């Protein structure tokens, strides 16, 4: 059975003309700004520029450095929305030849649940991420 990659996503976006169908989503861990999100939309969708609005609050996403809030977003375009057919690569995990780095990383994560590099709490550490 394939892994459900949508598990834990706290940002989802929809075609406003088909609000029950999810176009995609991701886990907002505090690093994606509204500008980043709009840039993602311009890569993902063939129709640009989209207008994106949060469903509950009605907040219109703008090109700012404000963090994107978790939620459900409707994407509005002047023509029908089509997802790009560009090839994509699932996030790759790099492996090292020795287990030394893995042991160090795993030890730190098990101690405090934080990223070894950034020091930010990894809220998905319980999932092995």
Image: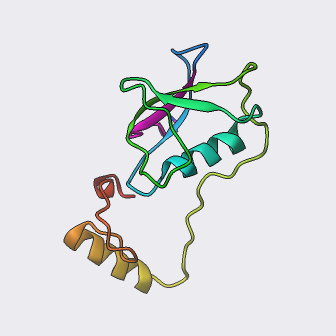
Comparing 51 with 125, the one in front is 51
Q: Is residue 4 above or below residue 55?
A: below
Residue 101 figure quarter: bottom left
Comparing 119 with 66, the one in front is 66
Classify the position of the C terminus by image quarter: bottom left
Residue 114 figure quarter: bottom left
Q: Is residue 94 above or below residue 12?
A: below
Where are the magenta residues, as a range?
A: 2-15
Q: Position of residue 70 (x, y in %)?
A: 38, 39
Comparing 12 with 56, the one in front is 56
Horizontal side of residue 86 vs 55, given as left or right: right
Q: Main secondary structure of the magenta part?
A: loop
The verdict on residue 13 being magenta is yes
Horizontal side of residue 46 vs 17, given as left or right: right
Q: Position of residue 118 (x, y in %)?
A: 38, 74
Q: Position of residue 25 (x, y in %)?
A: 51, 37
Identify which residue is drawn at 59% across, 13% down. 18
Comparing 92 with 36, the one in front is 36
Identify which residue is drawn at 54% across, 79% down. 96
Horizontal side of residue 110 vs 83, given as left or right: left
Q: Is residue 112 above or below residue 40?
A: below
């Amino acid at each position: 059975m394939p892994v459900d990659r949508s598990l834990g996503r706290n940002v989802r976006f929809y075609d406003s003309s088909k609000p029950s169908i999810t176009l995609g989503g991701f886990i907002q861990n505090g690093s994606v700004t509204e500008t980043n999100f709009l840039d993602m939309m311009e890569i993902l969708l063939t129709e640009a520029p989209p207008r994106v609005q949060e469903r509950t609050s009605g907040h219109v996403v703008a090109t700012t450095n404000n963090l994107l809030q978790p939620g459900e977003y409707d994407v509005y375009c002047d023509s029908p929305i089509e997802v790009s057919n560009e090839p994509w690569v699932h996030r790759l995990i790099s492996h090292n030849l020795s287990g030394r780095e893995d042991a160090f990383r795993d030890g730190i994560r098990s101690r405090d649940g934080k990223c070894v590099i950034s020091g930010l709490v990894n809220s998905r550490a319980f999932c092995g991420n």
